[in-house]
Amino acid sequence: MSDVINRNARTLLWEVGCEELPAWSCDAIERQLGGLVLDAITDAGLAVDGATPVIWVGPRRFSVLLETLTERPAVDETLSGPPVKIAFEGGDPSAAPTKAGEGFARKSGVDASQLQVDETKGLTYIERSVPSAPIEELWPALADTILGKLQFAKPMRWGSSPWRFVRPIRWMVTMHDERVISYDCWGVTSGRTTRTHRFLGEAREAQLTTADTYAATLRDGKVIVDHELRRTVIEQGLAKAAAELGGEWNDPGNVLKEVVHLVEQPTVLTGRFDERYLELPERVLVTAMQSHQRYLPVQKNGTLAPAFLTVMNADPAAVDSILPGYERVLAGRLDDAVFSFGRDRTRGLDDMATDESLGAVVFHAKAGSLADRRDRITFVAKELATQLDIDRKLVSDAARLAKADQVSGVVQEFAELEGFAGSLYAEANGYDESVCRAIDQQFLPRGLDSKLPDTGVPAVIALADKLELLVTMFAIGESPTGSRDPHGLRRAAIGVVRIVLEHDLPVDLDAALAAAGAAIDNQELATVDGDLIAQVSDFIIDRVEKRLSDAGVRVDAVRAARAADLPLLQHLDELARAIDVEVKGGNATFQSVLEAQDRSRKLIEKAGGVADGDVDTSAFEVESERELHRMLEATTGELASAVQERRFGDAVAHAASLGPAVDAFFSKEQGVMVMTDDQALQDNRLRLLQRVVDATAPLGELSQLQV
């Protein structure tokens, strides 16, 4: 970058103040804002090479600091437009512009008479001079665009405003170094006035002198605007408080990331609770602390201590009056947990699992009750148990009891304990240990990197749960559309893929999905046909394709392997990886097989198919025909066996061994004319090519490969 441009660079500050932002929306802003701002600045011609935005997000504000140019330099640019046949009436450049042509010109800021034609490419274009413009002139429109592009799960309107945002916007600051950029945006006027901590700031507002003093000014106003610094301050406070108790803090519920976005000036408190609550299972007690109150438990000598840590956003001097309130709230939650847990243990899981209990809970208006879902899961689980040779009695028990704790008092109080609560009650009722683990682990894995269920009964129940959910939701018309996936079907499909591949389970996916379809048909909820099963199967296999792509496997290798339509997900995974290795390795003999398969198919299609009958070796005229036939005889069976035994590297190697014979068959020096005038000879050579296609078919559609 030139020194001139560097001298024209200044720090841009943009702060947007809102009513209290939910923690989940702070995460969304963190993920999106930097990219949106950088794209907007770049498109506007204000970007400084190498400059990256600093994003700070808190409960009442989010802000951006970025080095930008003070003005956009003047440039001459060429904008490509629609094809000539679309831009002008009748495709004639001398005719009047169409609406498409006029729209392109209008969007480009020029008159339609300035449309020009690139005769070589058949496209229209516009040449225009873009004058220089100061950032004060450009930024207001950029700010409006950025706010409009921020995406939230639950946006809202406020007052009579037309805008939709996660919370009402109440103030805005925009400065470029010491200069204020003033403009109206989303119901507020941007200036230099920010707001301090709601309770602790000496004044409600503060005037900024420069963009670079933003953090320091707010620090004086009792606001730590940098969320990473807030996290560090909180973690240091937690470590100190836990050490004073002789223990360590932990965060099994991962609530700290939320706490960071609930406070602007964090203060760590140490609270205590009655030791009698330690009689509760540790996970129940910790969930009571974290699910609503966002408290952090303390471990001492490997066990839970009768104490907790929490973070407040109030005056540290008021700790003595505030702390008893925190302790009373937790005591109330723990009293509820003790009561619910005791009542559930007395009732027992078998009583919760009855048709009467689960039948009273609606799973989905179109998919029946929890009892109906339990029966569908059981049906699928039995199919999987048969496939994987798992004890059907244990699988049946686990499937029957898996959803029973949905009607328990503990789960109704703490939804996070579903599955785990049921496993405790099953253990108390004397069920097999594998059944208890299956109930606890039925929702695993919960994401791309989370823990898997154990092999055996737990894996079967987790698979049955996800496969039933997928088929049921597709059957009742609730499949994902775009980014909308309210039932978590993509997560369920990822779970299926991870369990099958990472535990290497030989699951016949189509048979398991068909079992789910049969269960739905038996309950007369919907009609499930082969097309719907194929849709769900493709939906799951799409996750395998994405997994392989993320692992660096070429997309064309995955799609080639997918066309092989092999029965197990492991087949697709391993075959795609084997093909990927050959293609990336530049194996010339393998490449000749790809070309041979593709060329053979095209010749067969050109001939309208292959006549019935076997290859007649006595009709061969040249050695290349005989050699190709010999190689096919030697290779076809070996290749098929290698695929069946999941030796895909060997299978690809067998296919590659056909390369020299294929090259010779098609070569000018040694080869033959397939489409000869002698029909009998042509048919025989086409049959030989069909053998090439058939021999390599277990490797998929190799013509998909771009080599």
Image: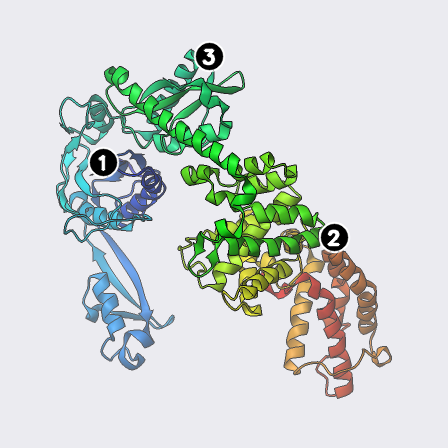
Q: Residue at horizontal 49%, vertical 27%?
A: 280
Residue 582: x and y in percent read: 67, 53
Q: Which mark is residue 490?
A: none
Q: Mark 1 points at which residue?
A: 13
The label nearer to you, 3 versus 2, is 3
Which circle's residue, 1 or 3, is located before the other in the chain?
1
Question: CB atoms at circles 2 and 1 under 8 Å apart?
Answer: no
Q: How far apart are marks 1 and 3 (CA)?
A: 44 Å
Q: Name the residue under label 2.
A: 647
Residue 673: x and y in percent read: 73, 79
Q: What's the residue type where badge 1 is placed?
A: Leu
Q: Residue at horizontal 81%, vertical 78%?
A: 615
Please tell me whether mark 3 sits on a helix, a strand or a loop.
Answer: loop
Residue 506: x and y in percent read: 68, 52
Q: What's the residue type where badge 3 is placed?
A: Gly
Q: How far apart are marks 3 and 2 (CA)?
A: 56 Å
How crowded pointer 2 is (Cα within 10 Å; few <14, some 14-19, many 20+) is rated as some
Q: Name the residue under label 3.
A: 246
Q: What's the residue type where badge 2 is placed?
A: Arg
- Placement of 576 over or under 675, stated as above or below: above
Please tell me whether mark 2 sits on a helix, a strand or a loop.
Answer: loop
- The quadrant of the picture occupied by the C terminus is bottom right
| 274 vs 419, nearest the viewer | 274
Q: In this view, does 32 lie to the left or right of 197?
A: right
| 57 vs 183, nearest the viewer | 57
- Placement of 363 over or under 624, stated as above or below: above
Which circle's residue, 3 or 2, is located before the other in the chain?
3
Q: How far apart are marks 2 and 1 (CA)?
A: 59 Å
The label nearer to you, 1 versus 3, is 3
